[in-house]
């Protein structure tokens, strides 16, 4: 077992600022606080070599949990072990076998080229010359870093910096990788390259990866399993496909026609959208084959696509189901 999280809790004591100047003045002498539960009785396990999506809305507790897993925050109660280590003990051996990449934080040194940061990491992690050169060559090739290595970091685009951040995080060949929004702010093409790299790296090195992302494309491309939390509590832990089938017992059937006839489409299914030359229907999963056959028989169909609902919709439904249930 690579990661074990057992009844994890993290509370923060937050100053409550009252409205009005008189109450604000009083608070100088007597402060009032409230306890905020950032992570609440969270438990899960992750097998070695697994990629797991760690999902939830803003403020759900994902980043707080990630920081506890990396040893940057101490739990209020509960226990964490990662590859047999207790993260908050901050042992050197633990730091050498894991890595944390936060899309909104940079470990690259701003005024020097990425290559200089890589050399700093080589010294920090005590990587021998042969291992360093071999790993660097692999990362440079996979992430297409050659033109970027000797440019000042501040001159690189966000996408270029993110690729260099990944390389810096992987130079010491960590067994466990925590990725917090690794594709945030990247263009679609760079997002796809980063996803491909992460998948290939996991396949080649069997690295355990816990991934948070607001881009559902990251999750669907990389993760078979997802853990969903909200208000610090576990909502779902399991197969992504099972979650989709459970919460959305329908598929989207997209029909392309030369021209749309004046037709009551509700006889086929619930209308999701109608555009020029295209109608999208929500069809119960068990009726997809029957409805598709009818449409192909009754209309001059140019194209017909069947797909699951957008993952954003599935995740939203997961939150709603829990809050109502």
Image (spheres, rainbow, N blue to C red):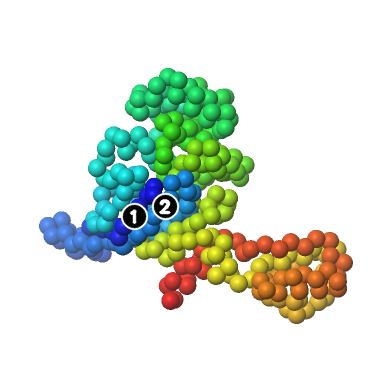
Please name whichever residue, 48 or 138, is drawn nearer the observer in this view of the structure.
48
Tags 2 and 1 touching, CB below 8 Å: no
Q: Name, please, the residue furthest toward the front.
A: 1
Whichever of labels 2 and 1 marks the residue nearer the N terminus, that label is 1
Q: In the rendered image, is residue 258 in sight?
A: yes
Please tell me whether residue 236 is drawn above or below residue 119 in the rendered image.
below
Determine the CA span between mark 2 and mark 1: 9 Å
Q: Residue at x 86, y 71 (%)?
A: 297
Q: Residues within 10 Å of mark 1 (few under 14, many from 20)?
A: some
Q: Residues within 10 Å of mark 2 (few under 14, many from 20)?
A: some
Q: Residue at x 58, y 42 (%)?
A: 196
Per the image, the residue denoted by label 1 is 5
Screen quadrant of the C terminus? bottom left
Q: Name, please, the residue furthest toward the top.
A: 129
Q: Is residue 309 left or right of residue 41?
A: right
Q: Residue at x 87, y 67 (%)?
A: 300
Residue 229: x and y in percent read 41, 61
Q: Is residue 162 left or right of residue 265?
A: left
Residue 66: x and y in percent read 37, 49
Please name whichever residue, 1 or 53, is drawn nearer the observer in this view of the structure.
1
Residue 79: x and y in percent read 28, 54
Q: Secondary structure at mark 1?
A: strand
Residue 17: x and y in percent read 24, 60
Please tell me whether residue 48 is drawn above or below residue 17 in the rendered image.
above
Per the image, the residue denoted by label 2 is 46
């Amino acid at each position: 077992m690579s990661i074990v999280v057992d009844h994890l809790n993290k509370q923060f004591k937050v100053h409550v600022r009252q409205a009005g100047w008189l109450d604000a003045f009083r608070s100088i002498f007597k402060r009032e606080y409230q306890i905020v539960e950032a992570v609440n009785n969270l438990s899960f396990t992750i097998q070695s070599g697994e990629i797991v999506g760690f999902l939830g809305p803003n403020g759900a507790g994902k980043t707080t949990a990630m920081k506890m897993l990396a040893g940057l925050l101490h739990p209020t109660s509960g226990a964490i072990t990662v590859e047999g280590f207790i993260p908050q003990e901050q042992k050197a051996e633990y730091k050498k076998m894991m890595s944390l990449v936060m899309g909104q934080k940079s470990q690259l040194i701003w005024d020097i080229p990425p290559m200089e940061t890589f050399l700093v990491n080589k010294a920090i992690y005590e990587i021998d010359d042969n291992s360093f050169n071999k790993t660097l060559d692999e990362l440079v090739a996979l992430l297409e870093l050659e033109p970027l290595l000797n440019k000042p970091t501040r001159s690189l685009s966000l996408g270029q910096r993110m690729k260099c951040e990944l390389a810096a995080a992987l130079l010491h060949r960590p067994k466990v990788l925590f990725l917090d929004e690794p594709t945030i702010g990247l263009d679609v093409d760079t997002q796809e390259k980063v996803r491909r790299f992460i998948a290939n790296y996991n396949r080649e090195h069997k690295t355990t990866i816990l991934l948070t992302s607001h881009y559902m494309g990251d999750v669907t491309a990389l993760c078979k399993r997802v853990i969903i939390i909200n208000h610090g509590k576990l909502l779902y832990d399991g197969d992504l496909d099972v979650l989709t089938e459970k919460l959305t017992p329908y598929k989207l059937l997209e029909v392309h026609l030369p021209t749309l006839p004046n037709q009551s489409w509700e006889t086929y299914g619930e209308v999701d959208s109608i555009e020029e030359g295209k109608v999208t229907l929500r069809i119960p999963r068990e009726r997809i084959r029957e409805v598709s056959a009818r449409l192909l028989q009754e209309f001059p169909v140019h194209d017909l696509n069947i797909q699951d609902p957008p993952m954003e919709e599935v995740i939203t439904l997961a939150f709603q189901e829990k809050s109502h249930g």
